[in-house]
Amino acid sequence: MKVVLNTAQLQNLVTKAVKGAGNNKLLPMTSLMAISYDGNGMLSLTTTDNTNYLTVKAMDVSMSDDELEVVVIADNFAKLISRMTSETITFTHESGSFFISGGKSTYNIELPLDVDGSEIKFERPMLTPPEIETIKLSSIKSIINTGKSALATTLETPCYTAYYVGKNVISTDTYKICCIDEQLVKEPLLISSETMDLLDLAESDLEYGKDKDSIGFKSVDDTFLLITKPYDGLETYSVDAIMGLVESKFKSACVVKKNDILQALDRLAIFVSQYDRNIIQMSFTKNALVLKNKKSAGTEEIDYLKECDGEEFDCAIDIEMLISQIKANSVDDVTIYYGLPNCIKIADGNITQIIALSE
């Protein structure tokens, strides 16, 4: 069987699909990519990391009538396809051999075999949810752009490496919190960072469904499907305590230019040594926000954009945490709430960020 494919469309699809391959040497299936062509213009590629099963599809990729079903090594296949320069690429699959050709290039691709010597079949999980909910793609992008920087990156409390998705979307490492006031699904669940990143590959809004063991996300344009499992630890996620901090009332607030404070922090970071434990001093004065390192070798003064009638307030904060959360903010004018002894708050529309203060 022979299938002639549009190179640009194929390259775009492979670039997405390979991101779903876990490449875990202990789990051979995670290094594979299943290629399927239906004989009617639709090509689909499937990969897995043993938790997430990602399928991406493209329509009108080919006018070939032959059907094709083959499994290849994902990494090598992706590298080859990305380097092809011909207008079209031809797949030929016959008698256990798989050839990829384009222009004057032809490659005989070694196919992974099962223990009985037959070609491997890629098993895909099935999902039959009793109810479908719609999730906007813009919501997924907002979660990643704003919430990812607040996720835990170590496993002291594993549930905090995932997003809480319920009445709100929450990410936290217990020192930083990001809360997006938007309900995506009816029943709360945890979604891993890896799963959320894969959802960003979709190109249209998503339909979400859940059965007993699995959850699934299918794009409304039918070019994306992700079947996975909720992340463990929902019962240990301290939602009430986190929301208590998010809903805290602050005495004062100021507004500063995002670029001004980021540039000031970037300069000040040069003078923050490892002995300072990344801590800087923040002073909210009547007219400006003043930043200093512990030894006061560097001082930055950032004018408020609006007159501030709040109380003067001094505190200490981790400079890297502050930078990461301000960078994640999507607006040019950043509103900072202060006055509590344990944290400050940055708010923008339905997004609230909490940053713990240091002693």
Image (cartoon, grey):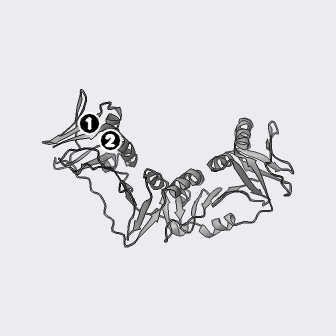
Q: Which residue is mark 1?
A: 89
Q: Is residue 159 above or below residue 326?
A: below
- The residues bearing labels 1 and 2 have C-alpha atoms spaced at a distance of 8 Å
Q: Position of residue 11 (x, y in %)?
A: 35, 39
**Residue at 57% in and 64% down:** 182
Q: Secondary structure at mark 2?
A: helix
Q: Is residue 209 above or below residue 223?
A: below
Q: Position of residue 244 (x, y in %)?
A: 67, 68
**Residue at 63% in and 61% down:** 350
Q: Which residue is mark 2?
A: 10
Q: Position of residue 75 (x, y in %)?
A: 34, 40
Sequence-earlier tag: 1 or 2: 2
Check contact, mark 1 vs mark 2: CB within 8 A: yes
Q: Nearer the viewer, residue 317 or 291?
A: 291
Q: Amino acid at mark 2?
A: Leu
Q: Is residue 254 left or right of residue 66?
A: right
Q: Is residue 85 left or right of residue 244?
A: left
**Residue at 25% in and 44% down:** 62
Q: Secondary structure at mark 1?
A: strand
**Residue 145, numbered circle:** none
Q: Nearer the viewer, residue 318 or 223?
A: 223
Residue lying farthest to the left in this orientation: 95
Q: Position of residue 246 (x, y in %)?
A: 67, 64
The answer to whether residue 135 shows anywhere in this view is yes
Q: Amino acid at mark 1?
A: Ile
The answer to whether residue 357 shows anywhere in this view is no
Q: Is residue 110 left or right of residue 307?
A: left
